[in-house]
Amino acid sequence: MLPLLSCSSLFVKSSGRNPKPDGPATSYEYQLSGTMRYPYTYYVVNRDSTGMVRIAWLTGHEPDVRVIRGPEDFFRHLDELVAQYNLHKLKNRYLPRADVRDGKMWHAYIRFANNGISTGGDNAWPPQALRDGIDAINQYIQSLIDASSEEDVLEVYEYD
């Protein structure tokens, strides 16, 4: 029962604030890491110099980051999820109240035309409603990746 309780707000302290989004989203980054060299999950979505949406990802402690073309309406959909889940209410940092020496660290950055949302945690997460928003974004990205094939990969590069 203790692992379930450790995610409760009683056991998490948070700090910092984020502004309401100002302008449309322009990029998204998420990383979930442990004590391994490469992250469990890593997503970066942005536009290249030609305006093409690029989705870069790494999963399962692999060293290779793959890149595919994303849909043109990706950032419109991201804006909708940010609004739906009120993600500007995320705090900048989430930490456990107890001393934890091992576990998972995560961060997410959502950049907008004039500001951004920055959040992350070390063995601690935001309240479930806000975590659901981050999960919804990541599930959307993963669905685009899952719908792609090796032929869709534009580039592969090493994480380091």
Image (cartoon, helix red, strand yellow):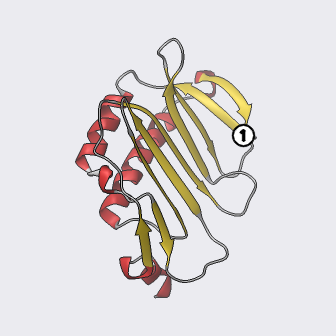
| Tag 1: amino acid | Tyr
Asked whether 27 or 5 is in front, the reply is: 27
Position of residue 49 measured from the top left corner of the image (x, y, whole percent): 54, 14
Give the labeled residue for mark 1: 159
Asked whether 14 or 121 is in front, the reply is: 14
Left or right of 35? Residue 83 is: left
Position of residue 69 measured from the top left corner of the image (x, y, whole percent): 52, 23
Q: Alpha-carbon neighbours of circle 1 within 10 Å: few (<14), some, or many (≥20)? A: some
45 relative to 116, above or below: above
**Image point (58%, 62%), residue name:** 105
Q: Quadrant of residue 90?
A: bottom left
**Image point (41%, 53%), residue name:** 135
Asked whether 89 or 28 is in front, the reply is: 89
Q: Is the C terminus in the top left, top right, bottom left or bottom right quadrant?
A: top right
Residue pushed farthest left?
Answer: 84
**Image point (66%, 62%), residue name:** 34
The number of numbered badges drawn on the structure is 1
Residue pushed farthest bottom?
Answer: 1
Q: Quadrant of residue 127?
A: bottom left
Left or right of 140? Residue 153 is: right
Position of residue 72 measured from the top left corner of the image (x, y, whole percent): 39, 21
96 relative to 152, above or below: below
Position of residue 73 measured from the top left corner of the image (x, y, whole percent): 34, 25
145 relative to 11, above or below: above
Residue at disc 1, secondary structure: loop
Residue pushed farthest top?
Answer: 50
Left or right of 146? Residue 135 is: left
